[in-house]
């Protein structure tokens, strides 16, 4: 599903708006005014209005150098990634403001703090208002001019966007004020209402999503939102909320209801027959054209001729620095290709953590995600090239073409994929089975989810290296993983492992550990491997580390867990796990970090009007 034309339309619309400030234009009725009958009189008008939501909800690789919701450049705060010096801290004080008045539908509104730590929107309800306006105009202006099927479809579109934004707001703030209509300036009591309980809000979201699944078109033409795209996102949002309520012991009844909808939505996509695992992993993220890729349910197209480009590929090209880079904890979570954790694997060299051996012993997603050699452009030496083509890395040390340099990248971005849907399905079903007496996950369920992913084809380059597919997961023969948390069952652990291998840098990991109530993974003092990179022999693998400037700084940990520091004379001894330079744990944090506080400005604004805005719990 291409988004290029939508972006072009929005850019044009913004240009016209900014260049048309004359008296005639200003005297016209606003497009959001119900009096402007001609603006809402037909289906084309509804389609054009809906286009304004696309860049905010289907971001892909964003555009230019923008980082909001973009992999590699935007999602760099999780337990998977480590940086030099002190790790990025959680927010430790209430911010002065959590608001952003920038309401453009092209540029996203997230601040760096929100992007890094919460993976969601600021305290801004512009898209809620936009969706409520959409719903009102469909109901009160357009409805007489369209047939019942058209009405129900567009109402489903509008309600999908409202529910999606509320889902994201609740992920960030928990309780938020719920609005189901466009507010007027004089409705002060509503404008300054306090936060509603997340349960009330998400029940409304649940109702919207049910309506969407019952009424949205199966197909609305290439490039447009349809039932399967919507169902994919519904499986994501409902899995988050259901599992969050369950693991945080907030509301078991609602947790069950939301998880059941997550499973239902995922099964709608899985049973459609339109989406299949026919692509190798690398092609999903570094292809110029995803239009024929059957695993991609929705994608964003980039086209230099339309000035729609991005920079995510450049930050995966081997030369650009990766400040927050993959650590050894993440790497050790990758399963060996015999389907067993490295501690119990029979694969030759399974206990070796040199990158060369890892590429041949681990699940193929390792080789497709990380460059084949240690690179000093990464803080850990593990360099993620998941979002760059194999051809892109051939330019190391020379000039990059526009496709892999600067902000002129044109590789298409998968917005949502079948892999996420099937993993949402199997996890939702597993929680329902374990906690609510639901039907047990069967081998057939595993075969159409985890094992279907593992059976993806390999590309020619991987095959030539000797990379092998990972053995299928057998429910009756799950290998013991000594790293498994004691409170997590073996099957649940393997489902979580699959997500971790699949979604590196894609923004889901931080949300996953939040909903599982595992934010303590971000305490890097719990495991020294958070501060380690690959096993290296500096003289052979990366002699650049033996520069005089690295004396006293470059360190490795040998097989006896002894730290060896480079002193300029002991190059032959610099063999072991790379120690990330001067890396230290982040400041202590608590459970309040699961949710964002609202800003002092917002609290004071309410108070100045005689109302109270309740602060987030713990803040």
Image (cartoon, rainbow, N blue to C red):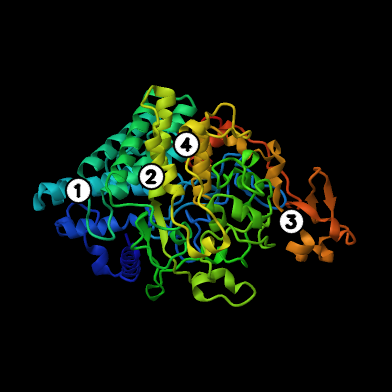
- Answer with left or right where residue 26 lies relative to residue 304: left
- Label 3 sits on a secondary structure element that is strand
The disc, 1 or 2, on the residue closer to the chain's N-terminal end is 1
The disc, 1 or 4, on the residue closer to the chain's N-terminal end is 1
| Residue pictured at 22% horizontal, 53% vertical | 219
Instruction: Tell me how far mark 4 sits from mark 2, CA to CA.
Output: 20 Å
Residue 235, percent from left and from top: 36, 41
- Observer-side mark, 3 or 1, equals 3
- Observer-side mark, 4 or 2, equals 4
Residue 577 visible in the current orientation: yes
Judging depth in this view, the residue of 362 and 579 nearest the camera is 362
- Observer-side mark, 3 or 4, equals 4
| Residue pictured at 49% horizontal, 28% vertical | 247
Judging depth in this view, the residue of 192 and 230 nearest the camera is 230
Judging depth in this view, the residue of 93 and 301 nearest the camera is 301
Residue 92, percent from left and from top: 62, 39
Q: Is residue 507 above or below residue 1?
A: above
**Contact, mark 1 vs mark 4 (Cβ under 8 Å):** no
- Label 1 sits on a secondary structure element that is helix
The numbered dot on residue 421 is: 2
Residue 476, percent from left and from top: 48, 31
Residue for badge 3: 536
- Label 4 sits on a secondary structure element that is loop
Residue 11, percent from left and from top: 35, 67
């Amino acid at each position: 599903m291409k988004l290029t034309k939508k972006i072009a339309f929005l850019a044009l619309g913004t240009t016209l708006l900014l260049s048309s400030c004359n008296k005639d234009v200003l005297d016209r009725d606003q497009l959001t005014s119900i009096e402007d009958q001609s603006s809402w009189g037909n289906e084309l008008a509804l389609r054009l209005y809906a286009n304004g939501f696309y860049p905010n909800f289907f971001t892909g690789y964003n555009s230019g150098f923008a980082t909001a919701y973009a992999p590699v450049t935007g999602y760099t705060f999780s337990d998977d990634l480590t940086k030099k010096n002190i790790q990025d801290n959680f927010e430790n004080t209430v911010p002065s403001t959590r608001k952003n008045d920038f309401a453009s539908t092209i540029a996203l509104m997230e601040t760096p703090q929100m992007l890094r730590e919460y993976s969601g929107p600021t305290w801004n309800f512009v898209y809620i208002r936009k969706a409520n306006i959409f719903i009102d105009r469909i109901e009160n202006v357009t409805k007489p001019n369209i047939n019942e099927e058209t009405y129900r479809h567009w109402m489903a579109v509008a309600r999908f966007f409202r529910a999606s934004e509320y889902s994201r707001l609740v992920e960030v703030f928990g309780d938020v004020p719920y609005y189901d209509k466009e507010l007027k300036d004089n409705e002060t009591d509503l404008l300054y209402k306090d936060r509603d309980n997340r349960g009330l809000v998400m029940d409304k979201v649940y109702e919207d999503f049910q309506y969407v699944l019952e009424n949205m078109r199966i197909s609305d033409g290439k490039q447009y939102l349809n039932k399967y795209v919507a169902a994919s996102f519904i499986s994501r949002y409902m899995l988050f909320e259901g599992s969050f309520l369950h693991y945080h012991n907030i509301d078991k009844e609602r947790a069950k209801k939301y998880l059941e909808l997550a499973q239902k939505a995922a099964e709608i996509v899985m049973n459609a027959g339109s989406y299949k695992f026919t692509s190798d992993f690398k092609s999903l993220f570094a292809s110029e054209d995803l239009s024929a890729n059957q695993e991609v349910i929705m994608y964003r197209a980039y086209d230099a001729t339309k000035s729609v480009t991005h920079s995510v590929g450049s930050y995966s090209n081997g030369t650009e620095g990766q400040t927050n880079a993959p650590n050894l904890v993440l790497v050790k979570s990758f399963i060996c290709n015999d389907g067993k954790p490295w501690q119990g694997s029979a694969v030759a060299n399974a206990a070796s953590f040199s990158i060369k051996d890892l590429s041949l012993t681990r699940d193929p997603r390792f080789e497709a995600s990380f460059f084949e050699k240690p690179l000093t452009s990464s803080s850990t030496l593990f360099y993620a090239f998941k979002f760059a083509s194999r051809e892109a890395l051939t330019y190391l040390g020379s000039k990059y073409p526009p496709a892999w340099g600067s902000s002129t990248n044109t590789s298409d971005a998968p917005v949502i994929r079948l892999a996420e849907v099937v993993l949402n399905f199997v996890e939702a079903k597993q929680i329902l089975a374990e906690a609510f007496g639901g039907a047990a996950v069967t081998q057939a369920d595993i075969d159409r989810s985890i094992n279907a992913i593992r059976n993806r084809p390999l590309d020619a380059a991987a095959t030539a290296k000797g990379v092998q597919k990972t053995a299928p997961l057998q429910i009756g023969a799950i290998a013991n993983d000594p790293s498994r948390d004691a409170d997590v069952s073996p099957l649940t652990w393997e489902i979580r492992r699959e997500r971790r291998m699949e979604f590196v840098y894609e923004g889901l990991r931080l949300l996953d550990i939040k909903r599982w109530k595992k934010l303590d993974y971000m305490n890097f003092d719990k495991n020294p491997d958070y501060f380690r990179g690959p096993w290296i022999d500096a003289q052979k693998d990366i002699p650049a580390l033996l520069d005089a400037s690295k004396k006293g700084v470059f360190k490795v940990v040998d097989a006896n867990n002894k730290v060896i520091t480079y002193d300029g004379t002991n190059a032959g001894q610099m063999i072991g796990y790379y120690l990330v330079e001067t890396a230290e744990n982040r400041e202590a944090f608590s459970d309040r970090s699961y949710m964002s506080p609202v800003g002092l400005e917002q609290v004071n604004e309410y108070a100045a009007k005689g109302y109270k805005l309740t602060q987030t719990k713990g803040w």
